[in-house]
Image (cartoon, rainbow, N blue to C red):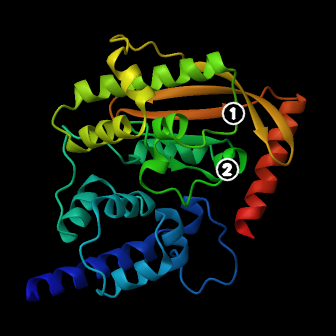
Amino acid sequence: MHAGVVSSSELGRVVRRWRERVAPGTVGLPVGRRRRAPGLRREELAGLAAISADYLTRLEQGRATSPSVQVVESLSRALRLDDAERDVLFRLAGHVAPGPGVVCSRVTPSVQRLLDRLADTPVVVYDATWTLVEANAPYDALMGDTSGWQGLERNALWRHLVGPGSRAVATPEEHAELKAGLVADLRGTATRYPGDPAVGRLVAELARLSPEFTELWDSADPVVRRDGTRRKTVAHPTVGPIALDCDTLVVTADDLRLMVYTAEPGTEDAERLALAVVLGTQAFVG
């Protein structure tokens, strides 16, 4: 028990130290003049990691033990840790960092730099199971706030086969094509990661919840055809319909999918997109 207390205390100390070294500007937060310290506030890190500020406080004070793998991964991403630091964080939390045979669910430093350069563009990152890893503020402003999504809510297959879908408008034929493509891609993922138990659990849960998933899974095309660019119309509740190009970029080394939404400059759609981002960002800050 004593070793566990020491580990929890050390984990909290390390998280606090790394939080205090992260400059707000590097994670897209305003610097402001009222800051008494150069690093992130607890509530800021909690928001970036999608955990409660109360839980982060208990974690830093050594009163919260055994954080889940998902929490550790989220903290690692929010703190912008490199690979060696991430391994340390996992070890202090009592876990082994996921290895090469497991679906990558982290935004690597190089991908994060890419996201930083697209800070004004709606971007969402999915892992190889189409589970949301990170969405930036413009994406949430365009498509709806994702910060509160938990568990299966974060999975695109669940959202389209069982859940509420998205703000993107689609004909029945387009929606059917989207679902078939997602299931085929997940089938490919299961083939590439046969030893990852999380993939098997996701497939089993989707099969339990959706007969349509089972039908698509059994008939999935073994060759996944990726359409890198799609034209989508987003039904925004405030500014109205916005016609956008949605480019899906695959980061091969990390098996991540980046979906980037843009509008042709000088068009009414570009103006609506800019307005949606401004209004959404102001609402989140408020």
Residue 144's disc is 2
User: Amino acid type of disc 2?
Assistant: Gly
Q: Nearer the viewer, residue 180 or 90?
A: 180
Which quadrant would residue 124 be assigned to in this image?
top right
Residue 90 in percent (x, y) is at 23, 63
Specify whether 107 is left or right of 38: left
Q: Residues within 10 Å of mark 1 (few under 14, many from 20)?
A: some
Q: Is residue 60 above or below residue 44?
A: below
The x and y percentages for residue 274 are: 81, 43
Vertical placement of residue 18 versus 102, above or below: below
In front of the other: 83 or 178: 178
Q: Is residue 281 visible?
A: yes
Give me the C-alpha separation between circle 2 and circle 1: 11 Å
Element type at marker 2? Answer: loop
Mark 2 Cα shell of 10 Å, populated few (<14), some (14-19), many (≥20):
some
- Report the disc number at residue 168: 1
Quadrant that contains the N terminus: bottom left
Give x and y (percent) for residue 214: 36, 26
> Identity of the amino acid at label 1?
Ala
Q: Are marks 2 and 1 in contact (CB under 8 Å)?
A: no
Say which of 191 and 285 sits in front.
191
As drawn, the label of residue 283 is none
| Residue 2 x %, y % | 9, 89
Report whether residue 103 is seen: no
